[in-house]
Image: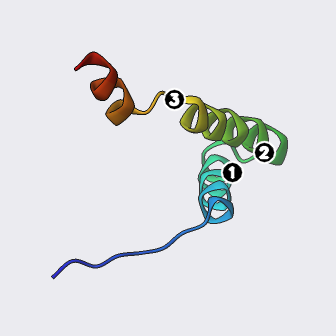
């Protein structure tokens, strides 16, 4: 049986920020690190689209 969890973009941002806050212990650094990670995820090329273009 497969379990599906629905999360929003806000949930993802919150989780990434909280993890960065745990790692760095500073709100400003955690905010910048979280923004960088989220930006990288959102701008990463879609691998399925790349495969379709290569075919």
Identify the mark at residue 21; answer none if there is no mark. Answer: 1
Check disc 3 and report its element: helix, strand or loop: loop
Residue 1 vertical position relative to residue 53 in the rendered view, above or below: below
Determine the residue located farthest toward the bottom in the rendered image. 1
Q: Quadrant of residue 23?
A: top right
Of badges 3 and 2, the one in the foreground is: 3
Instruction: Give x and y (percent) for residue 28.
Output: 84, 41
Q: Is residue 26 left or right of residue 33?
A: right
* Colouring of the image: rainbow
Instruction: Give x and y (percent) for residue 14.
Output: 67, 60
Which residue matches tag 2? 26
Which residue matches tag 3? 44
At label 2, counting other C-alpha atoms closer than 10 Å, the crowd grade (few under 14, some 14-19, many 20 or more) is: few
Q: Earlier in the sequence, mark 1 or mark 3?
A: 1
Q: Nearer the viewer, residue 46 or 18?
A: 46
Marks 1/2: CA–CA distance? 6 Å
Check disc 1 and report its element: helix, strand or loop: helix
Residue 22 vertical position relative to residue 34 in the rendered view, above or below: below
Q: Earlier in the sequence, mark 1 or mark 2?
A: 1
Marks 1/3: CA–CA distance? 24 Å
Identify the mark at residue 35; answer none if there is no mark. Answer: none
Check disc 2 and report its element: helix, strand or loop: loop
Q: Nearer the viewer, residue 33 or 24?
A: 33
Marks 3/2: CA–CA distance? 27 Å
Q: Nearer the viewer, residue 1 or 13?
A: 1
Evaluate if marks 3 and 2 touch, with contact meaning CB atoms under 8 Å apart.
no
Evaluate if marks 1 and 2 touch, with contact meaning CB atoms under 8 Å apart.
yes
Work out which quarter of the rendered image holds the C terminus and state it: top left
Q: Earlier in the sequence, mark 3 or mark 2?
A: 2
At label 1, counting other C-alpha atoms closer than 10 Å, the crowd grade (few under 14, some 14-19, many 20 or more) is: some
């Amino acid at each position: 049986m497969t379990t599906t969890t629905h999360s929003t973009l806000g949930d993802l941002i919150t989780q990434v920020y909280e993890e960065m806050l745990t790692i760095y212990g500073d709100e400003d650094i955690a905010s910048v690190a979280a923004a960088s990670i989220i930006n990288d995820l959102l701008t990463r090329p879609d691998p399925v689209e790349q495969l379709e273009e290569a075919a």
